[in-house]
Image (cartoon, grey):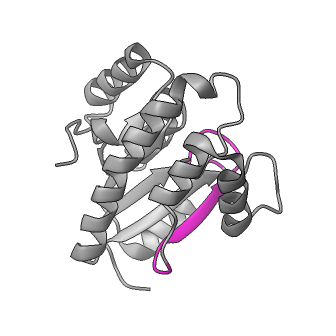
Amino acid sequence: MPRSRKVLLLVDFINPLSFDGAELIAQAAVEAARSAARLKKQFHQDGACVIYVNDNFGQWRSDVRTLLRECKRAGGAAAELARLLAPSKTDLMILKPRHSGFYATPLDLLLEQLAAKDLVITGLATDYCVKCTAMDAYVRGYRVAVPADCTAAESDQRKQGALMWMKEVLKARIAPSR
């Protein structure tokens, strides 16, 4: 496996948006996905690793193809997310059972094998899964960046609160992806 000091984590972007509050995050999620797609393209051009860290939505037999099909079938914002950020053949995928990408997953081992030091964490929702993943990355000694334009929450207030918390507590770099 090739080494990648810098790694892009795409958290819960492949998402059927079938939860309470999904209508509140849908448009912001599509905007964040557009920015994340540009960032992903840059990571690919730089030869850096891209890892999808996605909720398994309680489906212990779920896989990326099935999840992409569900999102496309759902239409609307879910289909747009799947279109914008469908994984490429070189991207890696981790399914997570809870909020953090590290909890009960092989993410830490994978990052160790990649010799990763810097994590750029994007995705949904800024104040839940992105924040929990960033916190777990920080306590494991990774340098964390969270591009503000590559995350979304159910309200701008919740997003901004989570971003400021990550900046202050986790020393995360919070800036636009460009």
**Residue 160 sits above or below residue 33 on the image:** above
Task: Give the residues drawn in magenta, as a range.
Answer: 89-103
Q: Residue at x 40, y 74 (%)?
A: 114
**For the image shown, how many numbered marks are present on the structure?**
0
x, y percent for residue 100: 57, 42
Depth order, front residue of 80/88: 80
x, y percent for residue 84: 45, 57
Q: Residue at x 43, y 55 (%)?
A: 9
x, y percent for residue 127: 48, 26
Q: Residue at x 60, y 53 (%)?
A: 54
Q: Would you identify the image quadrant in which residue 156 lies? A: top left
Task: Please indicate whether residue 61 sits to the left or right of residue 175 in the image.
Answer: right
Depth order, front residue of 120/168: 120
**Quarter of the image that includes the N terminus:** bottom left
x, y percent for residue 140: 42, 49
Task: Please indicate whether residue 19 sits to the left or right of residue 36 in the image.
Answer: right
Q: Residue at x 66, y 52 (%)?
A: 71
> For residue 101: magenta?
yes
Question: Furthest-top residue in view?
Answer: 157
